[in-house]
Image (cartoon, grey):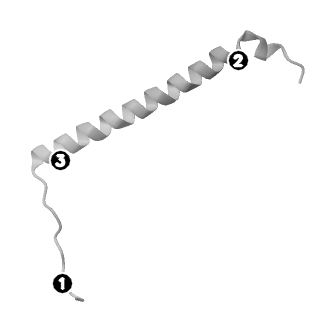
Amino acid sequence: MAGTEDPGVELTPQQLKSRRQRNIAIGLSVACFAVLIFLVTIAKLGPGVLNRPL
């Protein structure tokens, strides 16, 4: 088996473009979800969180 190269699957330019768009959409979705969780957490803590003794 040594010396044999497996070229793998060759994707068409349209498939590569589709993959890139899907990856961008997933990345934006994860980023938006993280921001949403952050904002909900801050909202639940309320403004009093800054008035506590250190």
| Side of 23 relative to 19 (left or right) | right
What amino acid is labelled 2 in the image?
Leu
Label whose residue precedes the other's in the sequence (3 or 1): 1
**What is the quadrant of the C terminus in the image?**
top right
In the rendered image, which residue does mark 2 sit on?
A: 45
- Local secondary structure at mark 3: helix
Q: Nearer the viewer, residue 17 or 36?
A: 36
Q: Give me the disc on residue 49.
A: none
The mark closer to the camera, 3 or 2, is 2
Q: Is the residue under label 2 in contact with that under label 3 (CB below 8 Å)?
A: no
At 18% from the left and 84% from the top, the residue drawn is 4
Q: Amino acid at mark 1?
A: Thr
Question: Which residue is found at the position 31% from the left and 36% from the top?
Answer: 24
Distance of mark 3 from mark 2, alpha carbons? Answer: 44 Å
Percent position of residue 39, x then y: 57, 19
Q: Residue 5: image x %, image y %?
A: 18, 79
| Contact flag, marks 3 and 1 (Cβ < 8 Å) | no
Q: Is residue 44 above or below residue 5?
A: above
Q: Residue furthest bottom?
A: 2
Nearest to the eye among marks 1 and 2: give it. 2
Disc 3: which residue: 16
* Amino acid at the residue labelled 3: Leu
* Distance Cα–Cα, label 3 vs label 1: 26 Å
> Which residue is labeled 1 in the image?
4
Measure the C-alpha gap from mark 1 to mark 2: 60 Å
N-terminal of the pair, mark 3 or mark 2, is 3
Spot the residue most to the right. Answer: 53
| Residue at position x 78%, y 15% in the image | 50
Q: Is residue 27 above or below residue 50?
A: below
